[in-house]
Amino acid sequence: MKSKRILVYVLLFIGGITMLIPFIWLMLSSFKSNSEIIGYPPTFFPEKFTFMHYLNINEKFNVGRFFANSIYLSTVKTVIAVYTSLLCGYVLAKFQFKGKKILFGIVLFSMMIPYIITVIPLYDMITSFGWKDKYIAIIAPTMLSSFGIFMMRQYIVNGVPDELLEAARMDGAGEFRIFHTMVIPLCINMISALSIFLFLWNWEDFLWPYLVLNSQEKFPLAVALNMFSGKNTTNFGGLFATSAVTIIPVVAVYFFFQKRFIEGISMSGIK
């Protein structure tokens, strides 16, 4: 039994190191010169450390503006999607009404539809609404998350006692008061877990903002990174340095919610 546990830990360690190698290579390459990055044979550690790419980020790249755009969009999209997911998940978990199973089936079915299939019809809708080059075009399509609704529903089914809700109703509490004062606090672990998922997906979203935004000053970081690729050359050093900076918020969010993230996933029924 002990040897089996040691083997599991060894395999997990190897898997963790394997997944970290690209990240470590990115960080180390951001301290290399462009000639060394594209040179052959490739090097893992820099032959000569240089901070030139980090020092020159703001000279050729308005990283502060793009960083603020990404923070704003990712935060707004995540907060709205988490709230609507929690509300819809609560309704599907604790209320009985005609067509409930069909509605939940639609939620599950929508999770199976590849995102790329919806891009063209969604783009036509955004264009007809006159939302091109506006943040509403990025925020509106993500206000509902089928994945978030499913996770919240699975968590609330067993995580929120029916007796507690009935007691609150007997005391005269309305449904929205119950939802905001009882359901939300009881689901804080799953809220943290879902927030990490959604924030990460929103932070690294490239295709949709790239299609609907035209003004450079509105670009999030994921889209703005494409500016490092010129017509004939690519500034790999600047690209790697900026990419390293963009990872910081994601890592910070994960470490801040790490404990609640693990608790939320373990209690949600998602294996």
Image (spheres, grey):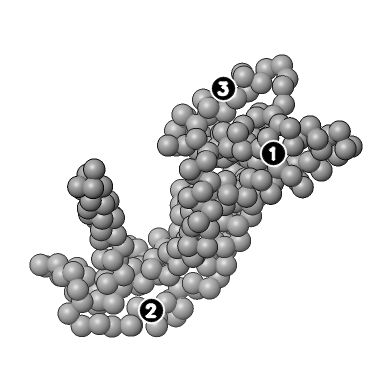
Query: Which residue is outermost to the right?
Result: 172
What secondary structure is found at the residue carrying circle 1? helix
Residue count near mark 3 (Cα–Cα under 10 Å), binned few <14, some 14–19, many ≥20: few
Q: CA distance from mark 2 to mark 1?
A: 43 Å
Local packing at callout 2 (Cα closer than 10 Å; few below 14, some 14-19, many 20+) is: some
Q: Nearer the viewer, residue 90 or 66?
A: 90
- Left/right placement of residue 12 relative to residue 149 reads left
Q: Amino acid at mark 1?
A: Leu
- Residue 223 visible in this rendered orientation of the protein: no
Lower sequence index among marks 2 and 1: 2
Q: Which mark is residue 264?
A: none
Residue, disc 2: 54
The residue to which callout 1 is attached is 87
Residue 87 can be seen in this image: yes
Q: Amino acid at mark 3?
A: Gly
**In terms of depth relative to the viewer, which is nearer, 151 or 84?**
151
Q: Is residue 265 above or below residue 101?
A: below
Is 100 left or right of 260, judged from the image as shown?
right
Where residue 46 sits, quadrant-wise, is: bottom left
At a point 43% along the width and 70% down the height, the residue shown is 245
| Residue type at numbered disc 2 | Tyr
Report how far apart the C-alphas of labels 2 and 3 lie in the structure. Answer: 49 Å
Q: Residue beneath label 3, please?
A: 105
Give the vertical position of 109 relative to 1 (above or below).
above
Q: Position of residue 5 (x, y in %)?
A: 26, 47
Question: Which residue is found at the position 57% from the left and 28% from the top?
Answer: 107
Q: Residue 11 in the image: state x and y as whole percent.
A: 23, 49
* Residue 82: % across, % down: 62, 46
